Amino acid sequence: MRLNNRRAIANIGLLCLITSLALPAALSLPALADESSFTGKPYTIPAGPLGPALSSFAGKSGVSVSFDPSLTQGKTSPGLQGHFNLNEASKPYSKAAA
């Protein structure tokens, strides 16, 4: 039971981290994000394990993401194909981390 509680708390932390990626776009603060955060940019990230997908997303979006790889084990990402702003692009990763 204790392990499940720790994993649940860790998952909540990971979800908060991923959700916070969209903060600059959600608050519309140009000082915190470049114009592409609002207008969108192209993403081509294949479906697969969540850890590598998050790393790929971070590289393509220009957002720093750090996480404990053990929190993403066994979780998958549906991938991301298309043109998205930062807020839209982070949604699949928020869902995958939940």
Image (tube, rainbow, N blue to C red):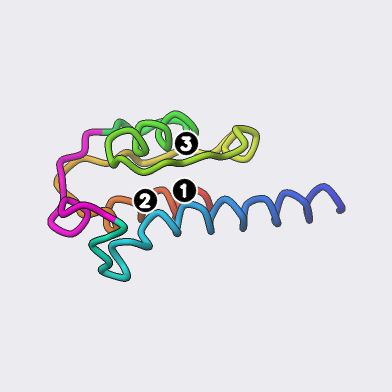
Quick check: marks 1 and 2 in contact, CB under 8 Å? yes
How many residues crowd around disc 2 within 10 Å: few (fewer than 14), some, or many (20 or more)? Answer: some
Say what secondary structure mark 2 lies in: helix
Quarter of the rendering containing residue 46: top left
At 27% from the left and 41% from the top, the residue drawn is: 80
Magenta stretch, residue numbers: 33-44
At 16% from the left and 50% from the top, the residue drawn is: 36
**First of labels 3, 2 by sequence position:** 3
> Compared with residue 66, is residue 97 higher up or lower down, i.e. above or below?
below
Reading the image, the residue beneath label 2 is 92
Quick check: marks 3 and 1 in contact, CB under 8 Å? yes
Reading the image, the residue beneath label 1 is 96
Reading the image, the residue beneath label 3 is 50
> Can residue 26 be found in the magenta stretch?
no
**x and y percentages locating residue 38 in the rendered image:** 18, 59
Marks 1/2: CA–CA distance? 6 Å
Tell me: 93 left or right of 87: right
> Type of residue at label 1?
Ala
